[in-house]
Amino acid sequence: MDIQITQIIFQVINFSVVVGALSVLLYKPVLKILEERAAKIAEAQKQAEATLAQQASLTEMKQKATTQAKKEAAQIVEEAKQTAQAQAEKIIQEAKSKSEQMLIQSRENWAAEKQQQQKALKDEFAVSVVAVSRKVMGEVFDEKTHTKLIDKELTQLLKLL
Amino acid sequence: MKKIIVSTAIDLTSAQQKKIAEAIKKKVANSTIEFKTDQTVIGGLSIKIDSQLLDGTLSHKLDTVKQALLQTQ
């Protein structure tokens, strides 16, 4: 086999032309496309990262809001509890005071009624004693006693004239 | 002339009436005396001179006692 320099040179030139043509027609466009794609990918990645960051921020805000809402709710519940307790205590106190007043009033009423009954008994006793005295005196006085009484009273009455 | 009524629980004898009349007339001259028997007076006597009443009866005394008892607490 003879290696001819002209063929070699021709091949080299041929190869160079092909490489050149390929470089212009294929390599550079493809490279450009690849670069564009890489840029797009980078852009998309950047956007995705921004979105992720935004999502993280929103999640954090949501967490804060939830915590705050829970805190406020707990506060409201606590305040409501305290208000209800204070109200209950007030009602109990008022009921206690009212029942004490009623007890005092009923005691006073009972004392007044007792006094009234005692007075009525005393009055009845006084009337009975005098009635019995009248009856006894009317029955036991003899003439001598009557005469004595008349003389005594006459002396007293004449002093008034 | 004054009208005097003497009330007693028992009937008085003439002597008793005379004694009472004399005693009264010493104090009240120019008067007529009438004697009445009223068992409700119980004892003692009352002397009524026109509209004035001098009550020395046991009935009156018992009424006074009753009023005093009713007024005390």
Image (cartoon, coloured by chain):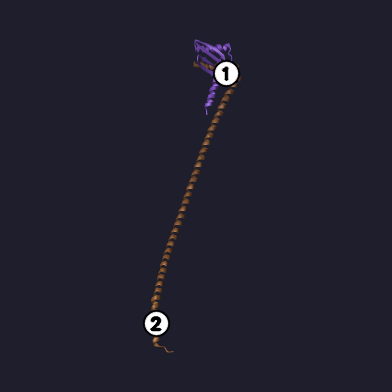
Chain colours: A brown, B purple
Q: The residue marked by circle 2 belongs to what chain?
A: A
Residue A14 numbered mark, or none: 2
Expressed as whole percent of the image width and height from the top left, the position of residue A22 reads 40, 77
Q: Is residue B2 above or below residue A80?
A: above
Estimate how packed mark 2 is, as few (under 14), some (14 to 19) or many (20 or more) residues with alpha carbons within 10 Å. few
Q: Is residue B21 above or below residue A113?
A: above
Find residue A30 and report its image quarter. bottom left
x 57%, y 18%: residue: B40
Residue, disc 1: B40
Find residue B44 and report its image quarter. top right
**Element at badge 1?**
helix
**Element at badge 2?**
helix
**Res A156 visible:** no
Q: Mark 1 belongs to which amino acid?
A: Thr
Q: Mark 2 belongs to which amino acid?
A: Asn
The tally of labels here is 2
Mark in the foreground, 1 or 2: 2
